Image (spheres, coloured by chain):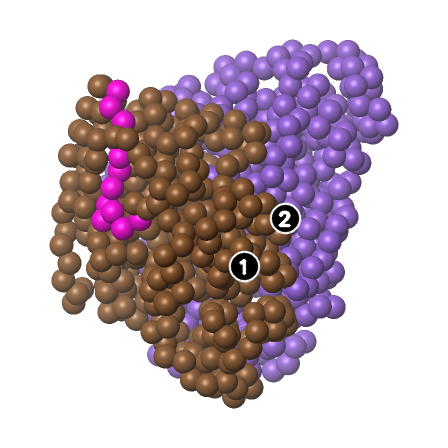
Chain colours: A purple, B brown
Amino acid sequence: MNLLYDERLDGPLTKTDRQTLLAEMRAAVPDLEILHAEEDLRPFECDGLSAYRAVPLLVVLPARIEQAAAVLRLCHARRVPVVARGAGTGLSGGALPLEQGVLLVMARFNRILELNPAGRCARVQPGVRNLAISQAAAPYGLYYAPDPSSQIACTIGGNVAENAGGVHCLKYGLTVHNLLKLEVLTIEGEPLTLGADALDAPGFDLMALFTGSEGMLGIVTEVTVKLLPTPRVARVLMASFDSVDKAGRAVGDIIAAGIIPGGLEMMDQLAIRAAEEFIHAGYPVEAEAILLCELDGVESDVQEDIARVRAVLERAGATEVSLARDEAERARFWAGRKNAFPAVGRMSPDYYCMDGTIPRRHLPRVLKGTAELAEKYGLQVANVFHAGDGNMHPLILFDANQPGELERAEALGGEILELCVAVGGTITGEHGVGREKINQMCTQFNPDEIGCFHAVKAAFDAEGLLNPGKNIPTLNRCADYGALRVHGGKLPFSELERF
Amino acid sequence: MSVDIVNADCSADLLTRVEAALASNTPLRIRGGGSKGFYGRAVDGAPIDTRGHRGVVSYDPSELVVSVRAGTPLADLEAVLADAGQQLACEPPHFGAGATVGGMVAAGLSGPRRPWVGAVRDFVLGCRVITGQAKHLRFGGEVMKNVAGYDLSRLMAGSLGCLGLLTEVSLKVLPLPRASASLRIAMTPATALAKFAEWGQQPLPISAACHEGEALNLRLEGGEGSVQAARERLGGEELDAGFWRELREHRLAFFADPRPLWRLSVPVHAALLDLPGDQLIDWGGAQRWLKSDAPAERIRAIATDAGGHAACFTAGMVDSPLQPLPAGLLRYHRQLKAALDPKGVFNPGRMYAEL
Ligand SMILES: Cc1cc2nc3c(=O)[nH]c(=O)nc-3n(C[C@H](O)[C@H](O)[C@H](O)COP(=O)(O)OP(=O)(O)OC[C@H]3O[C@@H](n4cnc5c(N)ncnc54)[C@H](O)[C@@H]3O)c2cc1C
């Protein structure tokens, strides 16, 4: 199924002439860097979901907030859609441009404005890279906790827009839990402050509402993040299992023992092999699954937790449990996990990364279901995931040059997500709906719920100019998709109990 | 479940009530236990009581998630969690025997542990809500991570019932700490603030920090080893752990003062504020309680200058107990209210006169 903007299903867009808009933009926003030649626009035609590409009308790269506000005012007046972009590492097509829209690149805003050790916070521009914040805070013994695997490249603005997570979320929370304040611009170019330097602000919690809103409610122009003291020690245990089921159950057992690990990740055999070949992390390539369990904090607590977790893992049937001997080995264990996507990428011309989250107790069932679906579609699936919080990343291997394979991969991905919804989970844990999962939103939410989302959108952007076609499907699209999905009057997985 | 609590699904009745209110344009005053009725503005509306709709819908301790009906007594929920060795880590105040889970989420107030683990809204994973279109809808879910659609469930936390009638919430829960110790060290408030700032940058297992009267009060929570080590390092005398409950519930002697009570929420590193009355510092400096007869404008000016805001916790003292919003923000609050509650039936005026 083609996921590019479809006016029939996603709503009409204003037709704008590139040259006219360019002239107006130049007049309205002095000194603004504007790209308009075909060859300059090309590099911006997609984000991390590279199967989908669209060349925008213009790409603008403001260097000052007033310029961004002026761009918004002009686009609002001319009814031109605006798509924001950070580093373009998003995996759901959130920053996929519109042929009839302007792409607003926020990456130039890359300054750390203030680092406040006593207040344990940092005020940064939206284009600052995630890792750069922790690097700047390190001399003070502080760090910024959410650590997406893409942290070398992705921007904090993009993290806010996606409510990004990382391997340490179970203990330290998602982006939304680590923010104090946002400065945003509405589509009218009006500045608003959401949240506060204090721990709360009067009124509705608009900061929480904007976090994860995928650039649909406003443009983030400044972010104040919380910083945490760097844990004294962090140790990682690696456990091997001869079955994915056992590994899945061990995850629940650790939590049930009252331990919240700093990180708790799982990889299946295909992912283990791919990572081992790529990174030489020292993973047991014969294992059906491994768990990586990081315990961090003060030395004595960590020692105690290691002993407890080791016992739990052994009881759960681990064939081997090893503790990273030193910092170098710990870094290697994590490097294998953090590079799992590119590692799998080396095994196959293309891969497609899913992001469903499920209640952990259904892990074995969903892994089994995924394997069955993979067989049905004749494709391989590697599983890498944030096991501690039930966030799965099945990676579907395919070759886009083989006719029909991309379509098969997408159909398989769609069914995996619907399986996640059927067991009481969600279609996206951290990568966002974007364009990619726009149809599956119709599975997760009913028309009234989707109606509510549209009402919220309209409260901030009545004309629907910010990132149209992303995140929330139109009811038209759902009706169309529903007609496609309901075969013989049966919903997918109608045999499963609905939660 | 070994703790016995009442289970009853009355959502159909609540929905019928909302339908009738919409049909007759009758504003509703949503109430649970009424324990937080003092908070916000008085609502002129027909009372709608959530307490019939109660009980735990699902709870699997190894998932760290509980789903519970809005009218469930908060004390019942806490008992169920404690029985499984878990807790609501944000330590919400009850402010009365009848406090309900719905009221706790709608008020969004958190206890002494808040700066270290997060506020009520940080633990909200999903909710069911009856909307201004008389639809019973579900947002968020029962999983730790979920970014599908806008985050309407966290938006409900602290919305004082102005955006819809909460019928059910799914909350993240956490294990009870393995070890805990509380201590008290005599010092001035200014020294205490300096200590909070110093300790805040170190990986110490602090889970509550308050300055009251003449002394600093600390709670340490974590593993036995770290708690004991910190306890030895910090010194001081032992403090009864019940102190934190009395603080959370506003039952310390400080709160008995007859003057109006104000809450100032300020940056954690704000200096000692020169306030017109008696103050108690909580949340490691981020929350300052004030007993004062001074006019609202004066108190608000001090809070604003310090980078925060102030709310009056004594009912009927000022027309807008919650700090008024700047014009731009107010406009979007009104638009959001109109989007979700177009007829204005849910708690009109509870948060602000304009909403
Ligand atoms: C190898 C790899 C690993 C990854 N691992 C993780 C992971 O572990 N956890 C995780 O959560 N994600 C992960 N991601 C996904 C991605 O990195 C995150 O979603 C990240 O937050 C996107 O940031 P970005 O700056 O690249 O944003 P972009 O991709 O440029 O944009 C993402 C969305 O944010 C909007 N946006 C960007 N900037 C702004 C702004 N200033 N104001 C308003 N809206 C804005 C865009 O319109 C778009 O909708 C991974 C991606 C890759 C390629």
Residue at the image point whose x is 30% and y is 40% from the top = B166
Residue beneath label 1, please? B286
Residue B179, image x, y percentages:
40, 80
The type of residue carrying mark 2 is: Asp
Q: Secondary structure at mark 2?
A: helix
Residue A308, image x, y percentages:
41, 81
The type of residue carrying mark 1 is: Ala
Q: Secondary structure at mark 1?
A: loop
Task: Please say if B54 is above or below B268.
Answer: above
Residue at the image point whose x is 46% and y is 54% from the top = B292
B201 in the magenta segment: no
Question: Main SS of the magenta segment?
Answer: loop
Task: Please say if A129 is above or below A457.
Answer: below
Q: Nearer the viewer, residue A85 or A293?
A: A85
Q: Which residues are magenta?
A: B25-36
Residue at the image point whose x is 63% and y is 15% from the top = A79
Residue B355, image x, y percentages:
41, 29
Residue beneath label 2, please? B305
